[in-house]
Image (tube, rainbow, N blue to C red):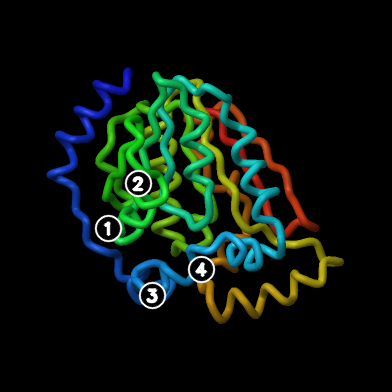
Amino acid sequence: MDKTSLKKLIDDDQSNAKNTIPPYLEETYWWAYLHPRGIRIFERQWLVNFILWGNYRRLREAALSEIDSHFQGNMLQLACVYGDLTEKLASKLSIKGQLDLVDISQAQLENAQSKLGQRQNINLIQQDTSSLNLPDNAYDATMLFFLMHEQPENVRLSTLAEAIRVTRKGGKIIIVDYHRAAGWNPLRYVMKGVFRWLEPFAEDFISSEVSDTLPIDKITGINKQVYFGGLYQKVIINC
């Protein structure tokens, strides 16, 4: 599907999308993603790097390594992120490529817009990642960067199902997120407290493998790498 046809489909569907902030997001993460002051505080790359124990650049590059330079296809990023990942993704686009960035929060999309400027081949789309109003098989690559651990199980599974639905046969889904750290890693025990205090859905997410929830008939392969003593993972799902 060329980017002009895809943009028309998105524009036609956008008016039917439900853009209500999910209760779990409003109740759990309002301070980090919805409140203007929170956005101003967390939109500092040094702070993102600090939160990730100095691993932001390494994890960002692990994600970016899955995208070819001069990317000519359609790329989807599910949820805005703090830091410069989206700008780096955009810089990989050729003149024929397109990046669609989806988030349910208008405030997050406005923050992303302020970082991206007036690039012509990027669409900002206000939708729920667990219920996308996007066409099937539309994207060559779909990116989820530290999204899944912030969603309750039912939302997380729906988001993953939607990612598979909109990614074309021969395309890939790129997931970078937390993972259960190795027993020898002292941060395994530190992060238990962090998750309990700030990330109430993360412990459930890392308690199982992403591969355990995948529809085998809809994927052709999966590959996982772990980083920093197993605290982080990159999962590539081939569709």
Q: Do the CB atoms of the residues marked 2 and 1 lie less than 8 Å apart?
A: no
Instruction: Single out the mark in the foreground, 3 or 4.
Output: 3
In the rendered image, which quarter is residue 235 located in?
Answer: top right
N-term mark: 3 or 4: 3
Q: On the image, numbered disc 3 is attached to which residue?
A: 37
Type of amino acid at the residue the image marks with label 3: Arg
Type of amino acid at the residue the image marks with label 4: Phe
Q: Residue at coordinates 64% horizontally, 34% vertically from top-left?
A: 65
- Extreme residue in the front direction: 117
Q: On the image, numbered disc 1 is attached to which residue?
A: 106
Q: Residues within 10 Å of mark 3 (few under 14, many from 20)?
A: few
Q: Do the CB atoms of the residues marked 4 and 2 lie less than 8 Å apart?
A: no
How far separated are the C-alphas under marks 1 and 4?
23 Å
Q: Residues within 10 Å of mark 1 (few under 14, many from 20)?
A: some
Kindly state the secondary structure of the residue where label 4 is placed: loop
**The one of 128 and 210 positioned closer to us in this rendering:** 128
Q: Is residue 131 above or below residue 197?
A: above
Instruction: Single out the mark in the foreground, 4 or 2.
Output: 2
How far separated are the C-alphas under marks 3 and 1?
15 Å
Question: Which of the labelled discs sits on residue 192, or is there none?
Answer: none
How far separated are the C-alphas under marks 2 and 1?
10 Å
Instruction: Single out the mark in the foreground, 3 or 1.
Output: 3
Question: Which of the labelled discs sits on residue 102, or is there none?
Answer: 2
Type of amino acid at the residue the image marks with label 1: Gln
Q: Residue at coordinates 62% horizontally, 63% vertically from top-left?
A: 46
Q: Position of residue 165 (x, y in %)?
A: 38, 34
Kindly state the secondary structure of the residue where label 2 is placed: strand
Q: Position of residue 106 (x, y in %)?
A: 27, 58
N-term mark: 1 or 4: 1
